[in-house]
Each structure stands twice: as C-alpha cells, then as structure tokens.
Amino acid sequence: MWIKRAKFCPVCQGGLELSSVGGRKRLRCVVCGCVLYENPASAAAAVILDKRRRVLLIRRDIAPFEGLWALPAGYQEIDEDPRQAAVREALEETGLEIQAGALIDLLYIPDDPRKPANLAVFLCSVVAGELCPGDDAREVAWFALDALPADMGFDNRERILLPLHRDPGRFGLG
Ligand SMILES: [Zn+2]
C-alpha cells in the first residue's frame, strides 16, 4: 500500500522491480540490488504551556486538517534532532522562541494522510518573542486544557492533550 512510486535506484539510477525481501514486497534495483526500504517520517510537536497551564495551539492554514486547531509541529529536517525541529516549527508557526524540555511521548501516527510518522512530543515553555501566526498557521491562541477546541486535527486532543489533562503527574507535571 505504501510502496513508493520511485522509478530509478537512488544509488546507481538502475531500474527497479518489485521483489519479496524479508517477507515484504519491496522495490529493488535490478542493477546493484539496492533495496528501497520504506520507513515512517520523523516529526516533532511542541506542547507549549504557560504558567496557568494553558496550551498554545495554532489554527492550520494548510492541508491536511486545514482550518483545524493543532499543536505546533512539523517534520524533522535531515540535519536537526527532534528537539530542534520542535523549536523551529514553534518559532515558524507562533512567532515564539521556546525551550523544548522533556520528551513526554513518542507516538506512531499510522493515519497521517501524507505518510505514517513517528511523532516526538516535547513539553515546552516560552523563552521570548511575540505571538504571531506565521507559515502554516492562520491563528494562534492559548487554551485551557479543560476547554480545548472541539475541532482539532491529527487527534491531538485524544492522543496528547486529554491524557496530559487527566494525568499530569505521568508527564512530570505536579
Ligand atoms: Zn542500483
């Protein structure tokens, strides 16, 4: 289902064929034998809390889930670690410089319409900056954890924020 539509080998530009490798259908180069393994994408999300324990959400301006609220998040660049990705995405989308603290969850997201992803979720706090929606965000606002918007994308409510609200101690919050 997730087999890439690549046409040529990334190593030698040879042609590719579907073959059974390790019990799965995979694309393999007919010239050098290189196998194109398919892996989830790597993404990072920032749970930015203020002193009143409100969370900062953005209203998305792009698909998927355009128009819905979500945590500041995005894909990790090839040359940054997950924590740096969370900090960069938060700055781009909210205008705020944040500090990414504890890794509070590592979620496998099988149903992202673009590609399945591993999502590293960090507990974050604001260091500096002015709230200003940017990049993929059309709006940015603080929400109490018991008054989250109903229209949230990526199941952020159910997968991340409601567990945090119900059992803050589990996430290192007293
Ligand atoms: Zn090849």
Image (tube, helix red, strand yellow):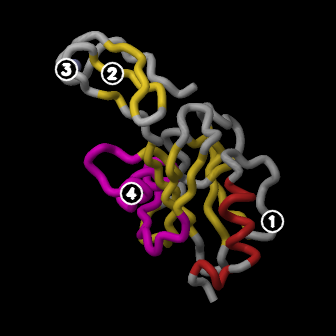
Instruction: Please name which of the two marks, 3 or 4, marks the residue nearer to the observer.
Output: 3
Question: Closer to the camera, 16 or 138?
Answer: 16
Say what secondary structure mark 4 lies in. Answer: helix
Q: Earlier in the sequence, mark 4 or mark 1?
A: 4
Residue, x 41% and y 62% (percent of image)?
97
Disc marking residue 28: 2
Is 96 a magenta residue?
A: yes
Q: Which residue is mark 1?
A: 147
Residue range corresponding to the magenta coloring: 76-105
Instruction: Mark 1: give few (<14), some (14-19) or many (20+) Cα within 10 Å.
Output: few
Residue type at tag 4: Pro
Residue 120 % position (x, y):
49, 59
Quarter in which the N terminus is drawn: top right
Residue, x 54% and y 70% (percent of image)?
104
Residue, x 41% and y 36% (percent of image)?
22
Q: Is residue 110 above or below residue 46?
A: above
Residue type at tag 1: Ala
Residue 21 % position (x, y):
39, 30
Q: Which residue is mark 4?
A: 82
Q: Earlier in the sequence, mark 3 or mark 4?
A: 3
Instruction: Please name which of the two marks, 3 or 1, marks the residue nearer to the observer.
Output: 3
Disc 3 residue lies near ligand 1 with CB under 8 A: yes
Q: Which residue is mark 3?
A: 32
Instruction: Mark 2: give few (<14), some (14-19) or many (20+) Cα within 10 Å.
Output: many
Is 33 a magenta residue?
A: no
Q: For marks 2 and 3, give the CA distance.
A: 9 Å
Question: Closer to the camera, 74 or 171?
Answer: 171
